[in-house]
Every structure is written in structure tokens, then in C-alpha cells.
Amino acid sequence: MLIEGQDLSVAIGGRPVLEGETISCEPGMMTALVGPSGCGKTTLLHCLGLLLPVDQGRILNGGKDVTKYSTEARRRFWRDHAAFILQDYGIMEEESVAFNVTMGVSLLGKRVTGNQERLMEVLEQTGLQGREKEMASHLSGGEKQRLALARAIYKDASVLFIDEPTASLDAANRRKVIELFSDFAMRGSTVIVATHDSEMINACDVLHEVGS
């Protein structure tokens, strides 16, 4: 899905954070939002993901203007098309790995529902095979990143929004998650990442300097 921002401006607490920002994020590619701390990388990411409204400008998804989407329309976009990997990982700590991937559970709350074969496939792809019954709280930081990505792969998201994914990871986990993000983009999805990590930046196809 092509994600575009046209002449975006945002002020928070009366302070301009984005001013006239224009960006185009192509499917099948990783776009890095780069710049010094405080330049508005995360704000731009949240605007493109419809998590934060803009004061001026337009946001387009697949050529469609979604700037004024209603709450329900935004929820449908998040449910049907988007996946997020934010700094808090966006996972449910006291739920199982399997539940965090499929987000489905029986009425009795005892059995995770969803496509079990696909669940096992994505856990293997992300190096979490055999961990499906564990509580997400037991995972390391790198494993939680991979769990969030497993959810995105499972739902076949067309666009992935990522905020500083490698900030707290060791070298081995950093390389692993960067490789997984690259593979996700190669499947045809749009990957947008706010980062200051040079290794992550080097892996991206397009660099957009925020505020330039």
C-alpha cells in the first residue's frame, strides 16, 4: 500500500513539530524516517499511521485521502491493513505468545483460536517456534520485537509502522529483527521505520530526513 503525506504540519502544546512535511512510502520497500532527536520522526510516523491527527496537509493510503477518517474508519484501517511495532512492543504481557499473534481466543478463554498452521509457520519464521504457550512477559526485548512482527506477518499486514525498533537490542537481536523487517518488505508490504540506528538506516531502501 502506497502511504503518502502531503504538506503535513503538526503542533503539540503550541510548539510546531512538523512543518510542511511531504513523504511517499512505496510498497515493497523500507523507508527510514531519520534526523536528530526531537525532529519529529515519531510524530510523522504516528500521523502516517493515523494515530495522531494533523493540523494541516493530507494523508493518502493507496491514493485515497484518509486525513479526515472517522474513528471507526481508522479502526478498520488498523484492523485490516496496518501493523505497529512501537517502543512498548504493543503486546499483551499477560497473554500467551500464540494469543499475541492471532489475537483470537475461545469464549471460555482457554484455547487460542485462529489458523494454527499459519501460527506455527510465522513463529518458525521469527525464531519463536515452541514458545506458543509461554506468557509474553517471559520473553526478552528482542523476542518481544519478533513477537510483534509475527503478529504482522500472521495478519498479512500491507503496511508496517515501526518506532525505534533496535534501541534496546544487543547486536545479535538487532541483526535478526532488521533481517525480518527486510524480508517483510520484500513480500510487498510497505515498511516505515523511525530510527537513529545506523545499521537499521543502512538496511532501508529510502531515507527521509524529517524537518529538512
Image (tube, helix red, strand yellow):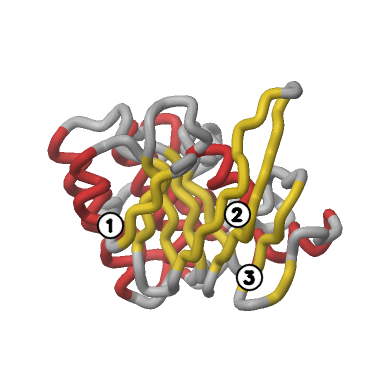
Residue wearing tag 2: 48
x then y, percent, for residue 17: 61, 32
User: Which element type, helix, strand or loop, lies under badge 1?
Assistant: loop
Judging depth in this view, the residue of 202 and 139 nearest the camera is 202
Provide the residue designation for mark 3: 61
- For disc 1, the marked residue is 204
Amino acid type at circle 3 is Asn
Q: Which mark is residue 32?
A: none
Q: Is residue 63 left or right of residue 177?
A: right
Q: Is residue 181 left or right of residue 115?
A: left
Q: Position of residue 36 (x, y in %)?
A: 38, 29
- Chain-order first, disc 1 or disc 2: 2
Residue type at numbered disc 1: Cys
Kindly identify the residue that appears in the image at 66 percent across and 30 percent down. Answer: 16
Q: Hey, which residue is sitting farthest left in the picture?
A: 172
For image coordinates 60% across by 39% down, the residue present is: 18
The location of residue 161, given as percent across then percent down, is 49, 53
The residues bearing labels 1 and 2 have C-alpha atoms spaced at a distance of: 18 Å
The picture quadrant where one finds residue 190 is bottom left
Categorize mark 1 by other alpha carbons within 10 Å: few (<14), some (14-19), many (20+). many
Front residue of 75/194: it is 194
Q: Is residue 31 above or below residue 16?
A: below
Specify the quadrant that holds the C terminus: top left
Element marked by disc 3: strand
Q: Residues within 10 Å of mark 2 (few under 14, many from 20)?
A: many
